[in-house]
Amino acid sequence: MELFAVILVVGVLPDFIGGTCISKNDSVKEDFKIFDENQIADFDYAQFGKSKTIDCCAHNVSRILWYFWNKQYPEWRLFPWEPYCSICDNRPRLEDNNQTLLIMETGKEHSGIYRCIAMSQNNSIAEHNTTIERQTPLYIAPQDKYVSIGDTVTFSCAGDFGCTIDKFRQVGWYDENYDFINNSRYSTSYAEKYGETYVEVSLTITDTRESDFNKTFICLVSSPADYQYFEVHILKKREY
């Protein structure tokens, strides 16, 4: 007998906190239900470079199998679908009696469909698919600012790149021609936070002049996964 569970819950699950399914299995009372619909999703995002959990919370099951499909390998592959690596420890792994799949470090190869197949103790079978899309680095965009002539103004631009193997990550300020800013009144400051995953670069302009109101300043945030640029302007504050 085969039972195909259709899950109607669409939501965003939290990043890995450990024991997600096991701690709540007692809340599922219906013996005929295999999956806990409140803890699994049809669709979710994973941030590039971050860990990600995909839950297949079930009860009264004897076995759970995981499969993966994406455009790069258009066929269902049984876990573990990544080749064994004796010197690395970042392959996806299973937690919570196979109810939770943990992606250690999300990359472009992890976008796709994850299927869990659960076999209950009374020989019923249910399956559930979760589609995962990879998010690009998290950008913190600068905003236009109103100032008066003679003021000092600072724009902050940042990116959260995650814990990636490729350490290339860049945040920089440029003029409207995408040239490096070269002005004695303009200065930039660079800062890394949270174990170097978060990079912030600030542009400070002192002694604002009339000519500054006509300029466009560009912040470029780039990584191996993606790039994004943001334009900001100094706006003249109304004097009352």
Image (cartoon, rainbow, N blue to C red):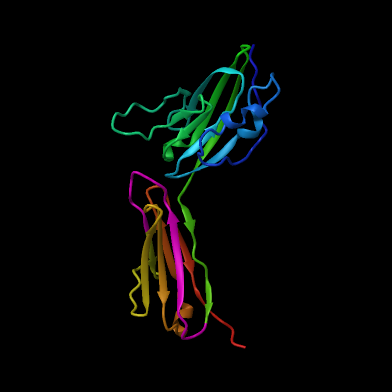
Q: Residue at x 45, y 66 (%)?
A: 156
Q: Residue at x 34, y 69 (%)?
A: 180
- In the depicted view, which residue is nearer to us: 164 or 89? 89
**Image height check: is 14 above or below 24?**
below
Q: Is residue 161 magenta?
A: yes
Name the side, left or right, on which 11 lies relative to 205. right
Q: Residue furthest bottom?
A: 240
Res. 176 visible in picture: no
State the extent of the magenta-drawn residues as a range: 148-170
Name the side, left or right, on which 171 lies relative to 18. left
Q: Main secondary structure of the magenta part?
A: loop
Q: Position of residue 142 (x, y in %)?
A: 49, 65
- In the depicted view, which residue is nearer to us: 22 or 119? 22
Q: Is residue 166 magenta?
A: yes
Q: Residue furthest right?
A: 30
Q: Residue at x 59, y 87 (%)?
A: 239
Res. 101 visible in picture: yes
**Image height check: is 105 above or below 78?**
below
